Each structure stands twice: as C-alpha cells, then as structure tokens.
C-alpha cells in the first residue's frame, strides 16, 4: 500500500483558487502525530492552523521547512511564507475584552488572506457611550464582524447604526442562561435588525471566511467601475435577457 493510501489527510491546496478562501487545519481532534505529518507535508507552502494550544504549538515550531508564527490569544498559527496584509479588510468589533480571543481569531484568519482588519474592543452596549464614541470609525468599514457574548445585544444595536454588512459571532462568554453562547446565538438569529448574518458560536474563522467573500465581491464591483456586474446578476435572477 502506498504512502498516499495510508496517509490520514489530504490538504486541499486548490481551495483558495476555487472559492477565494484558503485551506485551514482545525487542530482540535487531531493527534500530535497527524499535525506533525501535515506540517511536514506542507513543506514551505503557507498553511493556517486554528484551535492550536500553546503546548502543541511548541512541538510544531521549527518542525517544517517554513516559518512558524503562533498567536496564543487566538490559538492560531501561520506556517510558511505569509505576506504582510496589504488589502483593507473588514472591521472587527467586540463587546468586551473577554471576546478578544474570538475577535483575534477572525483578525488572524483575515491577515492570512492578506487583509488588514483592525479590532475595536470593549464597546458593548452596557456602556452605550463607548460604542457611540467610535461609531463613525466603525461606519467607515465596508464590512463589519461583531463578536459578543452574554445576551448578544451588540448585534442588533450595531446593525441598526451602520449600512455595511454585519456578520454576528456569538461568543461563549457569560454565565447562567448565557453560558456557552446560546443566548447570544439566539439573539443574533432573532435580531430585529434586518440582514444580520450569523455564524456559529466562537466561530471567528467562519466569520472571516464570510467577510473574505463579501470583500472580494465588493472589490469586483469596484474594479468594474460601475454597477454593471450587479445589474447583470439582477437580470439573470429575474429571467430578463436585455
């Protein structure tokens, strides 16, 4: 039996070309041996690793042929050559300092894709003045990722104040009925602010992927210099030919 037959993984190097979002390795659930084999197989090609704790990161450091950049707050790592972010990305807003690990995961995933995504932290609605003090800065973003735990009130409040697409990330921050992020998830899904897009609890990676697709669509319209692409889409959906 060949090495390919016995190997327990197959890295999808063509994913970014097909979808615009690069392959990522979820480290939860994988053994140390599997992660080490993945790093070695990647050679010097860039790879994003998520949900990687510090102890396991130390084992992987220096194992492969490429550089290794680990961030303990977000539990993410870059393997291989990752260029500095050069594109203006979405803004990331989080309700409390406790939400920063999830917000940072989104920011790191966006950085891996070449987007600079600033994080505006600790602007939860318990002190609404904090949010309003920075609202004009937030309104300048063309896409916003909002991270909040507890009751998730930030999602509806912020979505009612900006015109950019908003991606809600419920965080597992809170206690009692808010424990595990279920209350924040329900709040995001039941938001009275129309158009809020919601990803799974603590899923900063998923929010980043959604934002990348939005930013790519926005960039395509910008590059066309007109609304021709959007008009074509409307005609196709409505069945019009002219």
Image: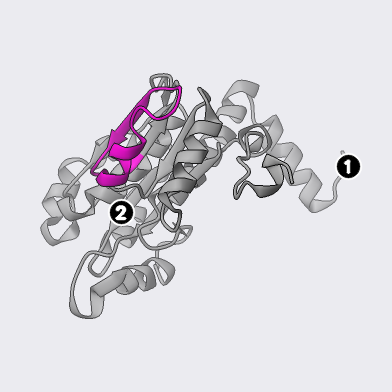
Residue that mark 1 sits on: 241
Quadrant in which residue 182 is drawn: bottom left
Residue 174 to residue 128: above or below: below
Give the residue drawn at x 52%, y 26%.
43
Of 130 and 100, nearer the camera is 100
Is residue 126 magenta-colored? no
Where disc 2 sits, the SS reads strand
Question: As drawn, is 135 to the left or to the right of 24?
Answer: left
Q: Closest to the observer: 30 or 138? A: 30
Residue 136 spot, x, y in % from top left: 26, 37
Find numbered disc 1 in the image and state the secondary structure of the residue it sits on. loop
Which numbered marker is on residue 147?
2
Point out the tag, 1 or 2, that comes first from the N-terminus: 2
- Residues drawn in magenta: 54-76
Is residue 97 visible to the viewer in this orientation of the structure?
A: yes
Per the model, the C-alpha gap separating discs 1 and 2 is 42 Å
Q: What is the quadrant of residue 22 in the picture?
A: top right
- Which numbered mark, 1 or 2, is in the foreground of this view? 2
| Residue 59 percent coordinates (x, y) | 32, 39
In this rendered view, identify the residue nearer to me: 177 or 123: 177
**Callout 1: few (<14), some (14-19), or many (20+) C-alpha neighbours within 10 Å?**
few
State the image coordinates of residue 220 (x, y, percent, origin top left).
Answer: 61, 28
């Amino acid at each position: 039996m060949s090495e390919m037959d016995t190997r327990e993984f197959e890295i999808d190097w063509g994913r970014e070309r097909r979808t615009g979002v690069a392959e990522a390795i979820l480290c939860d659930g994988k053994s140390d041996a599997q992660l080490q084999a993945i790093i070695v197989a990647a050679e010097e090609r860039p790879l994003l690793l998520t949900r990687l704790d510090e102890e396991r990161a130390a084992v992987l450091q220096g194992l492969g042929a490429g550089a290794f950049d680990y961030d303990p707050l977000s539990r993410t790592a870059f393997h291989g050559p990752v260029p500095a972010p050069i594109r203006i990305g979405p803004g990331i807003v989080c309700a409390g300092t406790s939400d920063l690990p999830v917000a940072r995961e989104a920011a790191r995933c966006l950085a891996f894709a070449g987007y600079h995504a600033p994080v505006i932290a600790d602007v939860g609605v318990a002190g609404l003045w904090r949010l309003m003090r920075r609202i004009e800065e937030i309104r300048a973003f063309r896409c916003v990722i909002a991270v909040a735990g507890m009751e998730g009130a930030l999602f509806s409040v912020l979505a009612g104040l900006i015109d950019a697409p908003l991606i809600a990330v419920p965080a597992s921050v809170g206690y009692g009925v808010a424990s595990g992020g279920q209350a924040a998830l329900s709040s995001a899904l039941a938001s009275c602010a129309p158009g809020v897009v919601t990803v799974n609890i603590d899923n900063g990676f998923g929010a980043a992927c959604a934002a990348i697709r939005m930013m790519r669509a926005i960039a395509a319209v910008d590059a066309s210099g007109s609304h021709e692409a959007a008009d074509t889409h409307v005609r196709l959906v409505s069945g019009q030919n002219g």
